Every structure is written in C-alpha cells, then in structure tokens.
C-alpha cells in the first residue's frame, strides 16, 4: 500500500536550478511508484520581482547581483547544463541572454492549476523549456499564450487573462505566504507542509528523503 504525500514545489520560471530540481523530483517519484504517491502543486516565487518590462542582459544582471565574472558564469552554466542533461532537461548552451519578469507566467500557472494538477505541471515544464531551453521572453504575452496552447490550454483565454488583472492577488498572497514561512531561495520542495528539501538536489536525494518521510516521523 502506497503513501500519498502532498508536495508544494516553490519555484520561479527564471530559476535554472528549478528545472533541474523538478526533473530530479520526477525521476525520484518514478522510482518510488507503487511505494509513494504524490500530489504536486507549483507555488510562486519571484527571484526578480522588480524586473522591468524590457528585462536585463544576463551577464550584467549576474555581475550586479552576485559579483560574478563572465568566466565564472560560463562555468556555472556548464555545470547546470550537465545537471539538466542528467534529468532530461536541455538548456540552451549559450544561456538565456536576458532576464525577464515572470509575474504573468505565475498568473497563468495559477490559472492552469485551477484546471488540474497535470495541466499545471505541463505548463510549468513548457515555461521552463521556453525560458531556459529556447531563450524566449516569458514576459511576452504572445510567448506565454503559445506555451499555454502547446500544453492544451485555451490560448484565447490565456490572452484574456494576461490583458486583465486576473489571479494577480492570488499570486501575491501565495508569494507572501511562502516567504512568510521562511522560503528565501528556490527550488524549495515542501512535503506535507512540514518538511523542506532545498535546492536542485539529485534524484537519489529526493528519493531517499521522500521514502523516509513516507515511512513516518521517526524515519524522517
């Protein structure tokens, strides 16, 4: 008899490690099939909530934010590319080029979640592929609506949502909830609203942690 876990995946479309972490989590869940079941919900977190509509050059942004050099950034990008390959995610080798605002992407993810967990997961993966795999501008309404259409969501309704303020309040409230719970970096994988697994961990780490949590408090 399998144990069902509630998993909240707190993340941002702009975060490359979130793509790695999601792929690894999915691999772990596949390994645990029959032993552990999971309901997976994606929660919003913005790494750059004040990013303007024009975005910012990636190298410039990382230098300003972290003080890293272009050489260091290239090395980190290669590490992330390799980790992505391990979990079946293909990063654009030369990187994204620019950082974009992701608030509208989070609004659409909230809407997708109202349609169902699988629709939300499909859109999350498509948005990550658009941003990190194809270096597309995920603040562009046309790009966002195409991502929705690609996973079977209504493209016209996506455009209508983006032209309105729909789900803006819900996303802001969810962001405040998770930040108020102490989430400061992503991905943050929260199990049963009790246990936190931080970062883009390897699949084996997720598998071990989920098995222990499913076994009960003593094991966890």
Image: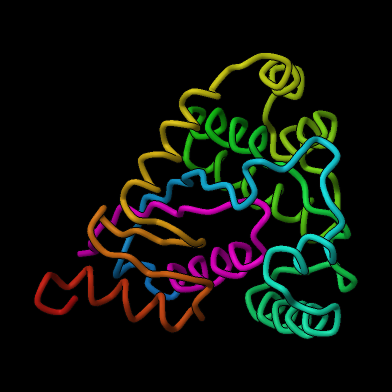
> Residue 170 or 180: which is nearer the viewer?
180
Image location of residue 147, percent across then percent down: 76, 39
- The N terminus lies in quadrant: bottom left
Q: Is residue 82 above or below residue 110?
A: below
Image location of residue 29, percent across then percent down: 43, 67
Q: Is residue 154 above or below residue 127?
A: above
Image location of residue 49, percent across then percent down: 62, 42
| Residue at x 31%, y 50% (from the top left corner) | 181
- The C terminus lies in quadrant: bottom left
> Residue 188 or 219: which is nearer the viewer?
188
| Residue at x 83%, y 80% (from the top left corner) | 74
Q: How many marks?
A: 0
Q: Is residue 207 magenta?
A: no
In the picture, measured across the screen, residue 205 lies left or right of residue 137, that is left
| Residue at x 44%, y 61% (from the top left corner) | 188
Q: Is residue 4 magenta?
A: yes
Residue 61: quarter of image: bottom right
Q: Which residues are magenta?
A: 1-30
In the picture, measured across the screen, residue 45 lies left or right of residue 144, that is left
> Residue 41 or 149: which is nearer the viewer?
41
In the picture, measured across the screen, residue 207 lies left or right of residue 186, that is left
Q: Is residue 117 above or below residue 40?
A: above
In the picture, measured across the screen, residue 18 lies left or right of residue 61, that is left
């Amino acid at each position: 008899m399998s144990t069902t876990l509630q998993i909240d995946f707190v993340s941002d479309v702009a975060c490359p490690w979130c793509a790695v972490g999601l792929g690894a989590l999915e691999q772990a869940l596949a390994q645990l099939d029959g032993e552990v079941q999971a309901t997976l919900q994606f929660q919003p977190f913005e790494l750059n909530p004040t990013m303007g509509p024009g975005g910012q050059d990636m190298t410039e942004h990382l230098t300003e934010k972290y003080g890293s050099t272009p050489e260091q950034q290239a090395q980190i990008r290669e590490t992330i590319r390799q980790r992505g390959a391990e979990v079946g995610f293909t990063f654009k080798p030369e990187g994204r080029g620019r950082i974009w605002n992701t608030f509208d992407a989070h609004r659409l993810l909230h809407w997708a979640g109202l349609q169902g967990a699988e629709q939300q997961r499909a859109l999350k993966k498509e948005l990550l592929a658009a941003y990190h795999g194809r270096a597309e501008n995920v603040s562009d309404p046309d790009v966002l609506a195409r991502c929705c259409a690609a996973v079977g969501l209504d493209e016209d309704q996506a455009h209508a949502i983006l032209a309105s303020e729909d789900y803006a309040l819900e996303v802001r409230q969810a962001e405040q909830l998770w930040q108020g719970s102490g989430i400061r970096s992503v991905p943050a994988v929260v199990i049963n609203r009790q246990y936190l697994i931080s970062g883009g961990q390897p699949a084996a780490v997720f598998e071990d942690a989920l098995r222990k949590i499913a076994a009960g408090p003593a094991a966890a």
